[in-house]
Amino acid sequence: MGIRVKKGDTVEVIAGEDRGKRGEVRQVLPKENRVVVSGVNLVTKHQRPIRAGRGQIQPGRIQFEAPIHLSNVMPVCPHCKEATRVSFVRQEDGRKVRVCKRCGQSF
């Protein structure tokens, strides 16, 4: 099976608290079937000051993007700007490319 979502893709959240939001994929975690999307699934963590090694970790409330399950996001086609499913097509040179199911353009 091919990779439907890659780092740098724009995705739309289709389920959960952040439904309807769009963001860029910052990290893909294929073993856990999760992705980290910028501006989506923001979590607040209360961090204690730790003096480990050379540096010191900044204490306080830290906000960061937590991973979201891959089934809750849908890639956005760069051509038609719509959330779409992805199919795969082999080109003449043997490369496998992702194709938008709505407009038929590869991305």
Image (spheres, rainbow, N blue to C red):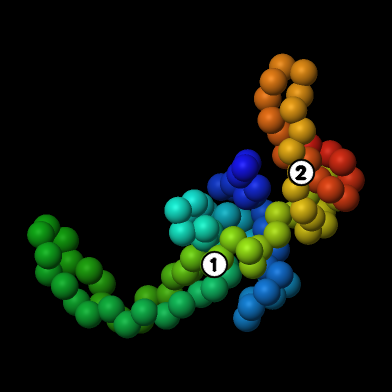
Q: Secondary structure at mark 2?
A: strand
Q: Residue furthest top?
A: 93
- Residue 10 lies, in percent from the top left, at 67, 54
Dot 2, crowdedness within 10 Å: few (<14), some or many (≥20)? some
Please give left or right for residue 32 compared with residue 71 in the image: left
Residue type at mark 1? Ile
- Residue 32 lies, in percent from the top left, at 46, 59
- Residue 95 lies, in percent from the top left, at 68, 25
Dot 1, crowdedness within 10 Å: few (<14), some or many (≥20)? many
Position above or below: 14 against 28? below
Q: Which mark is residue 87?
A: 2
- Say if residue 38 shows up in the picture: no
Q: Residue at x 71, y 54 (%)?
A: 75
Please give left or right for residue 47 compared with residue 8 in the image: left
* 13 and 101: which is toward the camera: 101
Q: Residue at x 77, y 18 (%)?
A: 92
* 7 and 14: which is toward the camera: 14
Indicate which disc, 1 or 2, sits on the residue closer to the N terminus: 1
- Residue 79 lies, in percent from the top left, at 83, 45
Q: Residue furthest right?
A: 103
Please give left or right for residue 70 compared with residue 87 in the image: left
Q: Residue at x 87, y 41 (%)?
A: 104
Identify residue for label 1.
68
- Looking at the rendering, in which quadrant would you find the N terminus? top right
Cα gap from disc 1 to disc 2, whole angstroms: 22 Å
Q: Which mark is residue 99?
A: none
- Looking at the rendering, in which quadrant would you find the C terminus? top right
Q: Secondary structure at mark 1?
A: strand
- Say if residue 63 shows up in the picture: yes
